[in-house]
Each structure stands twice: as C-alpha cells, then as structure tokens.
Amino acid sequence: MNTKQFRFSQPLSQPQAAPRSSFGALRKRAAQPGSSVPPQRIPSEYPAPALSLVPLASVPLSPAPLKLTVDVQRSIFAFGIEEWDRLVPRDEPQLRFEFLEAVEISRMGQNPTYIAVRQNEQIVGIAVAYETDIDLLTLASPGLNQFAQAIRRGPLKRFLIARAMSCGPVITNCRPNLLLAPTLSPSLAQEVAELLVQGLDEVQGGDLRVLFEYSTTAVQAFGTALERAGYAQGASLPGTQLEIVWPNFEAYTGAMRKFYRRAVKDDMIAGAELEIQIESDFSALAEEAHALYENVLAKASNVLERLTPEFFAALGHFEQARLVTAREKSSGRLVGIELLLVGDTVVQDLYTGVDYTLNDKHNIYFNLVYPGLALACQEGFKTVSTGQTSYAFKSRLGVKPYGLSIFVKHRNPLVNALIRRFKNVLCPVVEAPTHRVFHDKTAADAPQSTRKNKRKVQNAPSMPHNATTQTAVDPVVVSHSFGA
C-alpha cells in the first residue's frame, strides 16, 4: 500500500509499501476519444454491469457555428477518460472518470445515466444521475420523520417514498453532479445548463427528480435553468469547511484558544497507543474497512446511504482516494478508518469507521480526523471540507458552516405543486453552531503555508470546495440520493 507520513506531536509510524494495481488495459482502451469499451473488457474481479453502450440520444440542438449536441449514455465507458476528465477538475473528484468507474463497477449506483453536452465535439457540460428511492422527509423535522415511520410500519410501507432519478454523488460530499466548462460565456453557459436539465427530465426512471448539493455559486450557475424547468429550491443541511492558513499541524493547534488546544492534546494522549497511517491504495483493506464503517451505520439515527465492500475495493484504486487507518500498536489490529478524497486545493473528509470496543479508551474518532488536517497544512491545500451533520464536534475544530440547497421536481403537476407549497416543511433551514476556536487575529496573522502545491491544477473548479464526514458526535449518515 502506498502511504504518506505526517508529523504530529506523537509521530505516525512508517507504513509498508505495496504495489498499486489498476484497471490498466480497460483505461487504456477507454482513454481513446469516443471509445465504447464492451462490458466484458471490465476486469474479471469485478462483475460486468449489464449496461447498453448504445447512445440513447445524439441530436443536434443548435445551428452552426455552435454545433451543440447532447449525448446520453448508460455507461461511463462510452466516453474516453481523457475527453471526460479534460472538463472535470481534480477538485471535483466525484465526477472524475476513475471515481465514476469505481461506482459503476461496484454497482453502487443503480441504472446510471451520463449526459454530456458537446460544442464542436468537445464536452462542455456534464450531468450524472442514478435511479433510486427518495424519502421526501429526508430533511424534515424529527417529529415528522417519527410520524412517517409509524405509518410505514403499517400497510403504507412506502409512505412519502418515491422512485426517482437522483442527480448527486453516491457519496455525500456536498457537491452537485452537474458541471459546466469555465470557459463558456454567460449566455452559452445558460444554454448548456438548460440542455443538461432538459436531458435529466427526459431520462426514464421514476417520477421524481432530486438534484443536490448546491452552494451559492452552483445555484448561480444552474438555478435559473432549474426554476424554468419547474424545480422547487429547498434548504439542505449546511456544509462545513476549514480554510487552511497554517504551515503545519502544530501551527494549527497553536493558533487555538487554550480550551480547544487542550482538547486536541488530550485526544492525542489517549491515542498514543495507536499507529496511524494514510494509505493511498487500500483496496486490500476493503473488507476490514467496510466492517468498521458498518459499526458507525449501526449507531446512526438515519441511514440513507450504504457503501459496499465492492465500492471500497474499487475506490481503493482511485488515485485521489486516501484511507486514514488506525491500528492498535500492541496487536496490529485495525480499529479505525477515515475515508478522504484529495484534489488540487481541497481535502474532502468523507466517512468514518470505528471499533467501538476501543473508542472510549483511545478517542479513535477524533484521532482519525487530525491526519486529514495535517495533510492539508503540510501539503499546502487551501481547504478541508468536513461536510454535513455532527456540527457540535466539527465546530470544535474551527470549521465554518455555509448554506446548501437542493432542487426537487415531480412529474405529476399536482404533486409538484404540493412540494413547492410545503418545501419549507420538507426542507427546513438548519442552523449549525459555531465557536470562537482561534485567537482573534488568527486568520490575519497566521503564517501562511510556504509549501508550493505540487499538484498540477487543471481546470479551475466552478464550485466552492465542500465535502462531508460522519464523525464522532451524533453519527448520522445523510444522503438525498439513496433512500430506504
């Protein structure tokens, strides 16, 4: 396993390296523009999805010289890896070819649909959606959810649960699954956005359409097109993120006020018997990692998204994926994991897995979060995205919340009118707590990282950086894409 070493008050141990595997032959073939790799060419260790690669639509939509066309496919392998990733920046890892490849091969997403708008044969806009069940009360109040659960225990098993096309990542990382080329003029960007929304509306798969998560910048890019198409905008759970202004982890904790700095110190003392590493190829750990992740789901109050061992294994090959591992030094047993995605400027903290029999003794939850922060400081990242839920714990780290939106539409005009009428009940605004963690002059006076980011920035991301993590306090797994 390829690993990365980070400096802490208590050093992390040096892990053993292992060869990195890949889908080499498949990717080489998929890299050819316009290639259509047959399912049987997928490596034998992953069952080939029964998907047709025949285009569902390829229709000229504008006269020359724009030559805009819409290409709808049921497999990511219908596109070339280079033509797809030419549009997608590394700071949008949920839309990178390798990530979508992992989702498709592991069958994490049901009936995937990939929509690409081309201008003169070059992709300038994309959307990715999956068919799933959506609980319309995902974001509603606890009381309303309890009422619905009581009804579902009777004959109405699917009360307020609808079959839908969900345009959002299979992981909850607070990013939308629509993307526009940053070089488009405002008028052309609007036209491409409308074509993507039109394509989503025309794809078969349930009567409901749900699109998430949209920051203010993303709403500016797609909000007009979605509103014109009849979508209702509602509040989602706030995202959280930490802007990195420190050269290392010690400077980060040194900028904290005494109470918060002491809490970090106590956590690390409790974790002194843990060996912590960051793995960059963790496919061999998929089964162990998934078992620890399931421990968290078992305690979650709302499980709407469940990763699979196959997804962990496939994602382990993705070069932007990292797995923080915590092992008990005395036994070598894996007792905690934290799943990360890294871009050019952002670290996304996603999911946690913990052995609860040792959690109280070693403060495993908290000690799994710190390596991601150290990575960001040490390697010159600009932001650590810590996502939705567990706000009390995250506020202790100094993260700040920001607003996110979802867009919902039902094909039945009456149902859609009811959704618009009661959107504030279905999607109430949630206030996330914040604390004054750092000294007042921290942001202005903190030493900036002098490390030059070694990663080549490709396209400037069109969305602000955000992600999600399920952490120590109030473990809740929230997603609008995969419902019960």
Image (spheres, grey):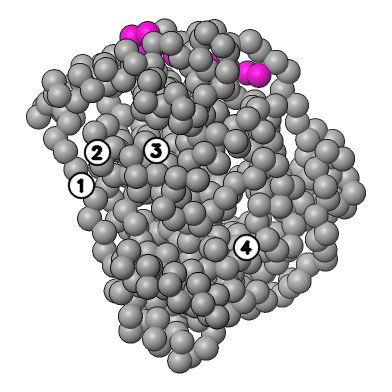
- Mark 2 touching mark 1, by CB under 8 A? yes
Q: Amino acid at mark 2?
A: Ser
The part of the chain drawn in magenta is 1-10
Residue to which mark 4 is pinned: 130
| Cα separation between marks 2 and 1 | 7 Å
Q: Are marks 1 and 3 in contact (CB under 8 Å)?
A: no
Residue displayed at 24% across by 38% down: 395
Q: Is residue 199 visible?
A: yes
Q: Which mark is residue 433?
A: 1
Q: Residue 67: x, y in percent?
A: 65, 69
* Dot 4 amino acid type: Tyr
Tell me which label, 2 or 4, sits earlier in the chain.
4
Decide which of tag 1 and tag 3 comes sooner along the chain: 1
How dense is the environment of label 2, judged by Cα within 10 Å: few (below 14), some, or many (20 and up)? many
Q: CA distance from mark 2 to mark 4?
A: 33 Å
Residues 265 and 58: in front is: 265
Secondary structure at badge 2 equals helix
Residue 369 visible to the viewer: no
- Is 45 on the left or on the right of 104, as rendered? right
Residue linked to disc 3? 471
Say what secondary structure mark 4 lies in: strand
